[in-house]
């Protein structure tokens, strides 16, 4: 019997809070068109942390991910340990109890490195996830909960006779952790037809630029046997590239990212707050986006699409979305604002010297 087609949808960072269902309102129909839906859960959820109520991180809000149809949530990221070991355990327990698979985290390093393998229409899909951005407190150890990771090293090289001036910055993967990742991929390769590797990686809030290590880990994963690479963490879209015929989504941006807590509190010095944001990230959030205080270009986002036929990826594409001032991602078609996302992706891909090209097919943007 010939295997049927499988459609996989993948989205970037997800943070939900009160009224979580509301924020998926304009993408829910599109997300339902999949056989497998994968996303990145950016933060832990637990009622046992003193900041849980203020940050709206009660696990009850995660019911929105069940009703939206998520099959797999990746957990390896820089915020995994925000609520300590208890937060990791509570988040994992909730997902288990509600039949959502998770990848990239666990009660110890051995468990955190384990893949998820799903079967749809006689096709096995394997998924692995690694945190490349730290901090070390999030990393799992033999007797410590946390995430799977690739340790990234940063080197600063002074190019001018100007001590303290802007250096050239080089990044690369630490060899031992990179080798562990490659071993995981090689072991998973024989257990699945389609192998997806997700990385928490990239330069946060910085448009266009793709760091050296992002290509290194992506290429290494493909060389080891991966069929598709996806990245998130930068809270911005990044360009795409094709390596050995495999697609690399360097940055998916956010899907739903509800973080009103990042805005200044009542009575707080707003000018001082704005100056600090500018110093740290180079921009000040637009206060007209009260739940979505990200870089102005972060309104452009996507739903990555993977079409599988006869147990092989035959097409990668994405559905363009724009986040409105209410913080809701909205699917945009070619005839309305979809061309803005197309043009944005074409521009940042070219500026980053990446080789992907795009074309419209209906209201999806196909990667070539």
Image (tube, rainbow, N blue to C red):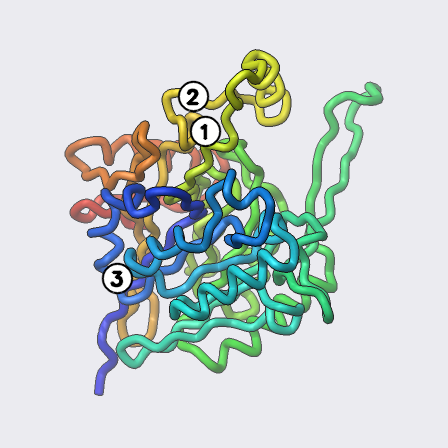
Pick the front one: 75 or 174: 75
Q: Badge 3 is on which residue?
A: 34
Q: Residue at x 57, y 17 (%)?
A: 268
Task: Identify the mark nearer the N-term, 2 or 3.
Answer: 3
Task: Identify the mark nearer the N-term, 3 or 1.
Answer: 3
Q: Residue at x 23, y 43 (%)?
A: 26
Distance between mark 1 and mark 2 Cα atoms: 6 Å
Pick the front one: 70 or 241: 70
- Horizontal side of 40 relative to 108 (left or right) equals left
Are dots 1 and 2 in contact, CB under 8 Å? yes
Pick the front one: 54 or 189: 54
Are dots 3 and 1 in contact, CB under 8 Å? no
- Horizontal side of 74 relative to 108 (left or right) equals left
- For residue 176, which quarter of the picture? bottom right
Nearest-to-viewer mark from 2 and 3 = 2
Nearest-to-viewer mark from 3 and 1 = 1
Question: Considering the image in quadrants, where does the N terminus appear?
Answer: bottom left
Q: Badge 2 is on which residue?
A: 286
Q: Badge 1 is on which residue?
A: 293
Task: Identify the mark nearer the N-term, 1 or 2.
Answer: 2
Pick the front one: 322 or 174: 322
Q: Residue at x 56, y 69 (%)?
A: 224
Image coordinates for residue 328, horizontal then vertical, percent: 31, 37
Image coordinates for residue 280, horizontal then vertical, percent: 63, 26
Image coordinates for residue 288, horizontal then vertical, percent: 37, 21
Image coordinates for residue 359, horizontal then vertical, percent: 26, 44
């Amino acid at each position: 019997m010939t295997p049927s087609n499988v459609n996989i949808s993948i989205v970037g960072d997800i943070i939900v809070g009160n009224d979580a269902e509301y924020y998926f309102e304009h993408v829910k129909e599109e997300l339902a068109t999949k056989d497998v839906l994968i996303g990145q859960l950016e933060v832990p959820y637990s009622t046992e942390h003193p900041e849980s109520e203020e940050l709206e991180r009660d696990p009850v809000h995660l019911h929105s991910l069940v009703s939206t149809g998520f099959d797999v949530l990746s957990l390896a990221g820089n915020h995994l340990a925000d609520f300590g070991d208890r937060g990791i355990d509570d988040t994992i327990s909730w997902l288990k109890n509600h039949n959502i698979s998770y990848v990239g985290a666990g009660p110890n390093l051995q468990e955190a490195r384990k893949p998820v393998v799903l079967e749809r229409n006689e096709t096995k899909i394997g998924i692995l996830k690694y945190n490349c951005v730290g901090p070390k407190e999030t990393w799992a150890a033999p007797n410590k909960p946390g995430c799977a990771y690739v340790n990234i090293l940063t080197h600063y090289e002074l190019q001018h006779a100007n001590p303290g001036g802007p250096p050239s910055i080089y990044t690369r993967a630490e060899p031992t952790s990179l080798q562990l990742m490659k071993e995981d991929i090689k072991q998973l390769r024989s257990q699945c037809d389609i192998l997806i590797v997700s990385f928490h990686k990239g330069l946060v809030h910085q448009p266009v630029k793709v760091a050296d290590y992002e290509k290194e880990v992506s290429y290494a994963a493909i060389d080891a046997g991966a069929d598709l690479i996806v990245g998130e963490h930068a809270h911005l879209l990044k360009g795409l590239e094709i390596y050995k015929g495999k697609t690399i989504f360097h940055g998916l941006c956010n899907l739903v990212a509800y973080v009103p807590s990042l805005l200044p509190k009542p009575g707080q010095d707003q000018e001082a707050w704005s100056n600090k944001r500018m110093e740290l990230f180079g921009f000040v959030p637009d206060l007209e986006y009260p739940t979505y205080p990200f870089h102005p270009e972060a309104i452009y986002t996507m739903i990555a699409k993977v079409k599988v036929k006869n147990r092989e990826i035959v097409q990668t594409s994405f559905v363009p979305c724009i986040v409105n001032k209410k913080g809701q991602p909205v699917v945009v078609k070619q005839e309305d604002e979809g061309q803005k996302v197309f043009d944005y992706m074409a521009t940042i891909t070219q500026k980053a010297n990446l080789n992907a090209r795009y074309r419209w097919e209906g209201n999806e943007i196909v990667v070539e």
